[in-house]
Amino acid sequence: MAKRFIPQPSVMSEVKNYLVIAAGLAFYAFAWNFFMAPYTFVTGGVTGICAIIQYTTGVPIQFSYFAINMVLIVIAIWQLGLRFCIKTIYAIAVLTLFLQLFQMVFAVYPDASVILGPDKQLESCIVGSIFTGLGLAFCFISNGSSGGVDIIAAIVNKYKDVSFGRAMLYVDACIVISSFFIVPTADTTMSLQKVFYGFINLVIVNVSLDYVVNSNRQTVQFFIFSNKYDDIAYYITRNLKRGVTLLDSIGYYSGKESKVVTTITRASQANKLLSAIKQIDPNALVSQSKVMAVYGLGFDKIKAKKKVLIDDKIVVDTDKMEKV
């Protein structure tokens, strides 16, 4: 049997992922130092915990951030695998450096804290939250993580049908509320304001995160016309881990019989598949179209009632498949 041709993953694609992660973390560190820290806002995640530590003890955020994440990395290796954690360790190191870098910039240019103008707490909270959400989203779509609660969210998302944003929201809310009792302020009203701004941050961050991540999870359908359909199908099943259906086809003009490869993938896998097809058969004819929704193995779960009334008499439990 002839050896199958399997396209090799592009080194540039991995380099691009690491650069995107770094860019996302730069957004995150910038938002924290220039929009959140000057007004002593408490955000969610490990960064929020480290912010509380910094506000109460004076320990710089990057040090406690690095220490806490080293513990969480052990859990991540166990649950998500070493490949995920390599990028996570890289992200933790990069974010630590960026936090330190922007703090140095802030020390040289202290007026940077009023980048939007003096006494602009609400505006700073909104803009900083948008940058934070985009930064985290860039990490996730590149199969990375900034560590901390992101690791917990990734584990929950792996086993449960819960979005990244929602999983993070539950934990983050507890951190923000705790700031009311821990972070010292002039009066109770100011403490309540900090909690209020913290929840504004949570909502905007998670909406931004879910918007970018879920848009990247859109599905597409392919119809691939090629004489090398077997190699293409082999690549899809072995490398992309997606199902393939081969349809019989007959060319109207040539009368030649062949097969049409049809498959459904995530939009994020489309470029990888197109690159592989180009390597296998540059003359292949490819039709790509967006799919509104896909349910089943490897995609989203069907969100519907478990019991269905049939013929006004029989109710079928779709989990147990028993008549009651």
Image (cartoon, rainbow, N blue to C red):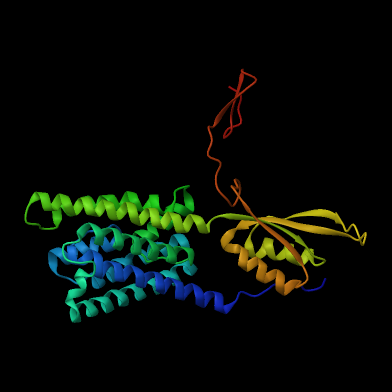
- The x and y percentages for residue 313 are 61, 17
Can you tell which quarter of the image residue 34 is in? bottom left
Image quadrant in which you'd find residue 36: bottom left
The quadrant of the rendering that contains the N terminus is bottom right
Residue 307 placement, left or right of 153: right
Q: Is residue 156 left or right of residue 276?
A: left
Image spot of residue 115 (x, y percent) = 23, 70
The quarter of the picture where the C terminus appears is top right
The residue located at (60%, 76%) in the rendering is 10
Q: Residue furthest right?
A: 255
Q: Name the foreground residue: 37 vs 78.
A: 37
Q: Residue at x 44, y 62 (%)?
A: 78
**Closer to the camera in the image, 133 or 113:** 113
Residue 30 visible in the picture: yes
**Residue for point 80% across, 67% down:** 228
With 172 as the anchor, is 21 left or right in this view? right
The image position of residue 269, as x and y in percent, is: 60, 63
Instruction: Tally the numbered discs.
Output: 0
The residue at the point 37 percent across, 70 percent down is: 25
- Residue 267: percent from left, percent from top: 58, 59
